[in-house]
Amino acid sequence: MKSLMIKSAKIIGSLLLAISAGLYIIGQFEWYFALISGGFLFLGSLNKSNKGESLFNAKNTKQFLYIYSLFAFSGLIVEIVRTWLDLWVYTSIYNETISVILFILLLYPVFFAFVFELFAYFKRKTKNLTWATIITLIIFIGWNEIANIFLPMWVINPEYNPIFIYSLSFVGYIAELLVSIGGGKIIKKVH
């Protein structure tokens, strides 16, 4: 049964990644959620099937709810800082309040889970914590910043100096990477 679930996650993940590419090409902002959902499912199933670290290794509902809560709370912190400092606005949102709630409940937990699975994948492949961290950070920044240039999902507040914003963003990306890695590690300690 578990092997069927892992295979299904890999297939669904692959389909979502393909859908993400298609949505990006035709200019639909939903590409991002398809990317992180597909990436999480695909890499999680790959890591699990290769006996690597994975959130798919959660043994019970308590572990799953713990990691989900940590990731959702971290997303809430990101949104509080974003709003408090007026750093950026989302472009393709129908109702900002509902969208931010959905981001906190769905997007951020899946986002952090995908980043963890990406890190676990490169840690397994490189067998080096430093290289896995660097590669994950480069890919992570790339899919956020480079993709946003061509299909803007968020717009940075033009009142801020771009050097300040990108420096702050870099610090934020490192913090998000640490939350992802730490969350994946903490799951082992929750029984």
Image: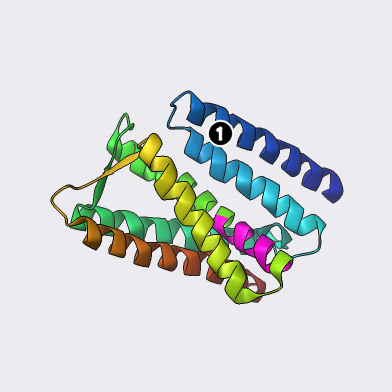
Classify 55 as above or below 128. above
Give the residue at x 80% y 43%: 7
Q: Magenta residues, as a range?
A: 115-124
Give the residue at x 78% y 47%: 6
Instruction: Say which quarter of the image contains residue 168.
Output: bottom left
Classify 42 as above or below 121. above
Instruction: Give percent across and percent down for residue 64.
Output: 62, 59
Give the residue at x 36% y 67%: 171
- Who is closer to the viewer here, 168 or 59? 168
Instruction: Give percent across and percent down for residue 139.
Output: 53, 55
Instruction: Give percent across and percent down for residue 50.
Output: 81, 59
Instruction: Say which quarter of the image contains residue 21.
Output: top right
Residue 160 within the segment the image draws in magenta:
no
- Who is closer to the viewer here, 106 or 145? 145
Residue pushed farthest left?
Answer: 159
Question: Dot 1 corresponds to which residue?
Answer: 20
Label 1: how many Cα within 10 Å (few below 14, some 14–19, many 20+):
many
Q: Identify the element where label 1 is drawn.
A: helix
- The overriding secondary structure of the stretch rendered in magenta is helix
Kindly identify the amino acid type of the residue bearing the numbered disc 1.
Answer: Ser
Left or right of 150, for residue 168: left
Give the residue at x 48% y 48%: 143
Instruction: Give percent across and percent down for residue 18.
Output: 63, 32
Asked whether residue 102 is in view, the answer is: no
- Who is closer to the viewer here, 127 or 118? 127
Asked whether residue 136 is in view, the answer is: yes
